[in-house]
Image (spheres, rainbow, N blue to C red):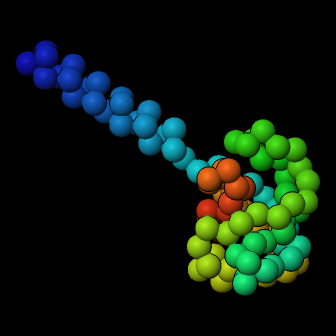
Amino acid sequence: MKTILKITAAAMLAATMTSGAFAAEFTRGTVKKLDVTAKKVTLIHEELKVLAMPAMTMVFRVKDVALFGKLKEGTNVEFVAERIDGKLTVTDVK
């Protein structure tokens, strides 16, 4: 019985650690420019801690064109940026 409890506890701990490791970190920014054809957005953003990048204005690729529905020039957004195939890419917006 103790062995089963230890295995269950270890599995729960591993699941918790795994899900936390992949939690998306949202960063605040302002949409400066959209280029839907090129699938790019220019954002004035706060520090991107996950990417060790200071606050600045820069162009990002947009992973999914559906995200453009949440982006409008001049609006404040919260977004997730990741490095995908060496390119900085917005993967989520709220």
Instruction: Find residue 9 and report its image quarter.
Output: top left
Left or right relative to 71: residue 21:
left
Instruction: Find residue 27 and report its image quarter.
Output: bottom right
Which part of the image, by quadrant, shows the N terminus? Answer: top left
Q: Is residue 27 visible?
A: yes
* Residue drawn at point x = 74 percent, y = 78 percent: 38
Instruction: Find residue 11 and report its image quarter.
Output: top left
Query: What is the x, y in percent for residue 58?
Result: 87, 60
Query: What is the x, y in percent for residue 39?
Result: 70, 76
* Residue drawn at point x = 70 percent, y = 55 percent: 87
Residue at the extreme front: 85
Query: What is the x, y in percent for residue 44?
Result: 88, 62
Residue at the extreme right: 56
Residue at the extreme left: 1
Residue nearer the viewer, 23 or 67: 67
Query: What is the x, y in percent for residue 5?
Result: 18, 22
* Residue drawn at point x = 72 percent, y = 56 percent: 88
Count of number-bearing discs: 0
Left or right relative to 3: residue 38:
right
In the rendered view, tell whether residue 21 sits above or below residue 30: above
Residue nearer the viewer, 23 or 59: 59
In the rendered view, tell whether residue 63 sits above or below residue 27: below
* Residue drawn at point x = 36 percent, y = 37 percent: 15
Which part of the image, by quadrant, shows the C terminus? Answer: bottom right
Q: Is residue 71 visible?
A: no
Left or right relative to 89: residue 28:
right
